[in-house]
Image (cartoon, grey):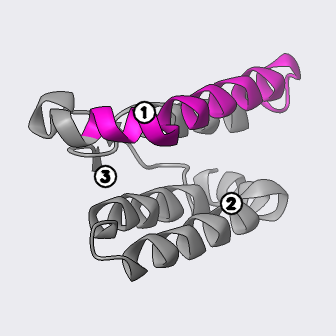
Amino acid sequence: MKTIGNILWLIFTGIWEALAWFFLGIIWCITIIGIPFGKQCFKFASVAFWPMGKEVDLDFGEHPIANVIWLIFGGLELALSFAIIGIIWCITIIGIPFGKQCFKLCKLALAPFGADVK
């Protein structure tokens, strides 16, 4: 069932979202100071491409300064957008699994530094 869900996710949102995160990570990595943020974008890309069956464990305390900088420069807006999209998906009965994946990405958007994706 995870494979079917991942294929549907890939068709509807995953491919575009993963490519956007991948290219954003490349842009961040061009600058020396942005390499840690680029690595987090690559983490987003891997989860956004094939999210079903992956778990996200947060550890905000591992890198609190980097997570606060992430929140200030776009992480909060990103998490809010994932939460809104997740709510919209959950309004429909069929979209509930996709809404859960958006909430997983919302969690990752809040504190990507120190987060473990399994």
Residue occupied by mark 2: 17
Q: Are marks 3 and 1 in contact (CB under 8 Å)?
A: no
Relative to residue 31, is residue 43 depicted above or below? above
* SS under mark 3: loop
Tag 2: Cα neighbours inside 10 Å, few (<14), some, or many (≥20)?
some
Residue type of the residue flagged with mark 1: Ile
Residue sitting at x 45%, y 61%: 41
60 relative to 24 in the view: left or right = left
Q: CA distance from mark 2 to mark 1?
A: 22 Å
Residue sitting at x 28%, y 67%: 33
Measuring from the top left, give residue 54's x and y in whole percent.
43, 49
Q: Is residue 57 visible?
A: no
**Numbered range of the magenta stretch:** 67-95
Among numbered discs 3 and 2, the one appearing first in the sequence: 2
Relative to residue 63, is residue 93 depicted above or below? above
115 relative to 77 in the view: left or right = left
Tag 1: Cα neighbours inside 10 Å, few (<14), some, or many (≥20)?
few
- Residue 91 lies in magenta, yes or no? yes
Residue occupied by mark 1: 72
Residue type of the residue flagged with mark 3: Lys
Among numbered discs 3 and 1, the one appearing first in the sequence: 1
Residue occupied by mark 3: 118
